[in-house]
Structure formats: C-alpha cells, structure tokens
Amino acid sequence: MADYFNELKTLEHEFKAAIDRKDEAATERLNDAISTVEAKMRDLEKVANRAAVENEAAAADQEAKAAFSSYMRRGSTAEIKAMSATGGDPVGSEGGYTVPRQLASNIRVLLTDLSPFRSVANVISVSTPDFRIPVSPAGAAAVWTGEKAARNETGAPTIVEVVPTFGELTAKPYVTQTLLEDLAYDIEQFITSSVATEFARAEGAAFISGDGVNKPKGLLSVTTALTADAARAYGTVQHVTSGAASDITNPDKLLALTLSLKAPYRVNAKWLTNRDALLRARTLKDTTGQYIWRAGLEAGQASTLLGYEVVEDENMPLVAAGAIPMAFGDFKAAYTIADRVQISVLRDIFSADPYVAFRTRMRVGGVVVDTNAYKLLKVGA
C-alpha cells in the first residue's frame, strides 16, 4: 500500500505541473493514472476487509456450500436438507435453489465493489413487493402562545408514501459438463464472478438513470429546479448550473453546490461523478490559487474535492450541454435500494446442450426517498 501512496503523490505533482503548462494530453493521461491508482488502493482495502469476514464462516455454511456444489456439478438433490437448513430453500414451483448464505454474501460483496452506488446508498432487504417508505416532508406546525392562552389546533405533519420500483435481474452463464466433472474447477467462484459482474453492470446503471419500468427508478430520474429547499416541492431536486456552456470551469459553482445542501446532510456528504467530470474538477483552483482537489495520501483517506470524498461511478453522464455529470449529497439518506429476494440458481441441462446453464436471478428495487439530501450540477446549455 505504501508504494501506491508514493505513486499517487508523484502523479499528483505531475498532474498539477501538466495543468500549469497547459499540456492537455498529459493532463488526461495523468488523470486516468490517478484514478487507476486510487481504484487499486480501494481494492486492497476491500480485499483485506473481505478476508476478515470470510474467516468467520461457520461449519454450517461450509456444509451448505458443499451441498450447493453437489447440485451445481451433478444436479443431485440428496443434500438439499443441508442446504435448506442454512438458507438454501427451494424456489417455488419453478425449481432451483437459493444460493447458500456464504456464496450469496460473496456475490453481494462483489456487487458493492463493482457498483459504487450500492456502497453509498441505503440498502435494505424486503419480503414483499408491496413495500412502502413513509416520508414526512415537513414536521407538525408550531406557534408561540402565552402561559394561560388557549391552545389552538395546529397543522399535522404530512406523510408521503414512497414506493420503490422493482425489477428482476437474470444471468445464465454456461459451463461444459467436462468442467463440472473436474473437481479442480471452482464452480462457485465461476458463478460468483460471472453473475456479480453482470448484475452489477445492470443495476449500477439503473440506480443512476433507471426509468422505473421493470427496473429501479434512478437517482437522476427526477424533476430538477433551481429553487432552494424552502421554496421547492417535495419530489423535486435542486440543481446548480455549471456556469459555462458545455463544460465545468467555475469552482465557485461547485462550492455553491456544496453550500446549497443543508448542514446535517453535509456531515455524510460525498461527490458522485465519473472520470470525465472529475478530470475537469481536478484542474480547478480556488481564489487563492489552490487546487480544490486533494489526493488521499494516507491509509484509509479518500481523495477529496472541496473537502468531501469523491466516489467515481462511470454510470454518471459525461460532461455535455444540459447533462448532469456530478451529484453531491448524503446518498444513504437520499436513495434506498431494496433487495426483494435472495439470489437463486436453477440448473438447466436441456436448453443449451452440450452446456449446463445456470439460471440465476434476483429482484431489486430502488427509489429516491429524500429530495433534499442531494444536489445536482447541471452543465450549461
């Protein structure tokens, strides 16, 4: 890890020097290099955390994994009792079995790694598609009164029900029977990596820009307005314009974006953006000539923009006229991801002969809950 910190520090100096000499090619190359090093540093931390979790696996989980492996390789149901006892229950009349607990956990970890937004949003598990989140946009009204004056009725708080929109994700990786018969081949790792990559790609895009049709409704799929919180109706998100046509060139606009967020939300606030917009933001300086981006050069310290952590998500739109390439806010308060059912697998030996197909599915929903908890940067037209 120390080597990465040193490399990041060197890249930071080279990047700023390239900006000062107006070398655009070098600036873009170094921006990509910085993002790559930061990603490697995050991966190392995640691997360390994952190893600690996996070391706590219980004997029952190992038994379930062995039974699941038997089902994967041979379609045997002899060990289903062991699977059911630890969470691997049959999936209704259509057949198949839910992934045992430890394997499902592995897939969830990979989803978090590959889909950055899942790691910063609020994630819950629900048992019904008719799941609703009660939200109170404003509290009860209160008035001043004298010690002995009559207490008149005041307005009651308004309750709004927010309903996540759900969709089903499916993946069907193929494996040859020869590989299944080879005990040296890690079928569980194959299922984990293959499914996690496809699920993360699909759900990550939906969490950001999903239209709510058979998929989650995304963070950016909301109405936006320039009006501040006090004058804006619930359900509409405030945006700040970039101040330049088709570009991000004004650091004051980014500062205005952070300060438009109420102080309680700023405690846990983060930037959400892609590499394209981050390149432009990294080149900006404040009124004292200091860069508003700072590299994280210590263990556990993330790179920051105006003092707030930056989360790179390539599902955010590219910089273009009228686009929204940057969001800032407390995303755990702003957005809820609802995992509807466990990940399940059905072994299919008929539809893709001579391959064995593994039909894997999950149901997931998502919705914006608090439209005051985040702000958007909209590029000028």
Image: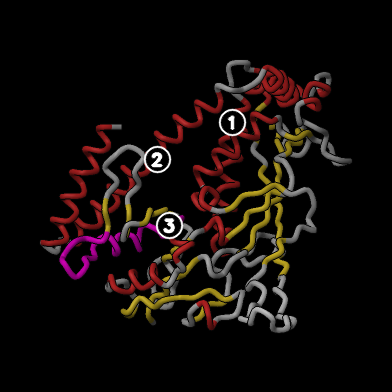
Q: Residue furthest left?
A: 21
Which element carries disc 3, helix, strand or loop?
strand
Q: Which mark is residue 42?
A: 2
- Amino acid identity at mark 3: Lys
Q: Nearer the viewer, residue 149 or 18?
A: 149
Q: Mark 1 or mark 2, which has the lower sequence index?
A: 2
Q: Is residue 84 left or right of residue 358?
A: right
Q: Nearer the viewer, residue 283 or 171?
A: 283
Q: Is residue 224 left or right of residue 37?
A: right
Is any part of residue 206 visible from this angle? no
- Distance between the Cα atoms at labels 1 and 2? 23 Å
Q: Mark 2 or mark 3, which has the lower sequence index?
A: 2
Which element carries disc 2, helix, strand or loop?
helix
Residue at the image position 30 percent from the left and 51 percent from the top: 32
Image quarter of residue 267: bottom left
Which label sits in the foreground, 2 or 3? Answer: 3
Which label sits in the foreground, 3 or 1? Answer: 3
Name the residue carrying label 3: 270
Whether pointer 2 and pointer 3 mark residues with C-beta atoms closer than 8 Å, the reply is no
Residue 268 on the magenta segment:
yes
Q: Position of residue 281 (x, y in %)?
A: 30, 63
The answer to whether residue 369 is above or below residue 35 is below
- Residues drawn in magenta: 267-292
Image quarter of residue 337: bottom right
Q: Position of residue 315 (x, y in %)?
A: 48, 58
Q: Residue furthest right?
A: 93
Name the residue carrying label 1: 190
Residue at the image position 55 percent from the left and 57 percent from the top: 205
